[in-house]
Image (tube, rainbow, N blue to C red):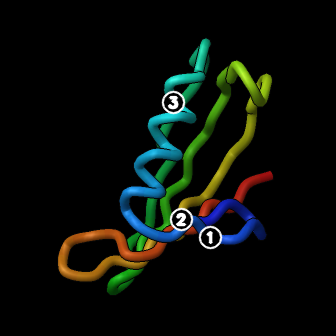
Amino acid sequence: MQENDQPPRVGKATNRAFEQDFFSKVTTVRTLANDGYVVSGNRAFVVWRVDIDHAEWGTINNTQVAIQEWKDGRIVREKFVYW
């Protein structure tokens, strides 16, 4: 997984640990909505609208696109682009 131009996090265990830590510190969810997606071959583009409060990062209010590459029914690469 990769966030914008940050270095990617590699490996299932690394990514799971990051996600568990991140979501354990979400204090308020105002909006977490899927605004659509496009699938083309082994790629998917998923649009998320996010408005949350995080204990360490403060308020996160953005729209992001998850660009996913799939293989054998699993995501093998994912990049989040947001503004």
Task: Tell me the distance, in whole angstroms, between the alpha carbons under discs 2 and 3.
Answer: 15 Å
Mark 1 vs 2, N-terminal side: 2
Q: Residues within 10 Å of mark 1 (few under 14, many from 20)?
A: some
Q: Which residue is mark 1?
A: 8
CB atoms of marks 2 and 3 within 8 Å: no
Three-letter code for the amino acid on which mark 1 is drawn:
Pro
Residue 56 point in image, percent of width and height: 74, 25
Q: Earlier in the sequence, mark 1 or mark 3?
A: 1
What residue is shown at x 79% (from left), y 23% (from top)? 58
Which residue was labeled with disc 2? 1
In what element is the residue under mark 3? helix
Q: Nearer the viewer, residue 39 or 16?
A: 16
Question: Which is nearer the eye, 62 or 60?
Answer: 60
Instruction: Using the image, determine if residue 4 lies above or below residue 73.
Output: above
- Image coordinates for residue 76, horizontal then vertical, percent: 37, 75
* Residue drawn at x 67%, y 60% as measured from the top left: 3
Q: Residue furthest bottom?
A: 41
Left of 5 or right of it: where is 11?
A: left
Q: Do callouts 1 and 2 mark residues in contact (Cβ within 8 Å)?
A: yes
Earlier sequence position, callout 2 versus callout 3: 2
Disc 3 marks a residue whose amino acid type is Phe
Residue in front for this viewpoint, 76 or 43? 76
- Closest to the observer, 40 or 54: 54
Image coordinates of residue 53 in percent, x first then y, are 69, 20
Residue at 49 percent of width and 58 percent of height: 46
Q: Identify the residue position indicated by label 3 in the image.
A: 23
The quadrant holding residue 44 is bottom left
Residue 63: image tag: none
Q: Residue at x 19, y 80 (%)?
A: 72
Q: CA gap, disc 1 to disc 3?
A: 19 Å
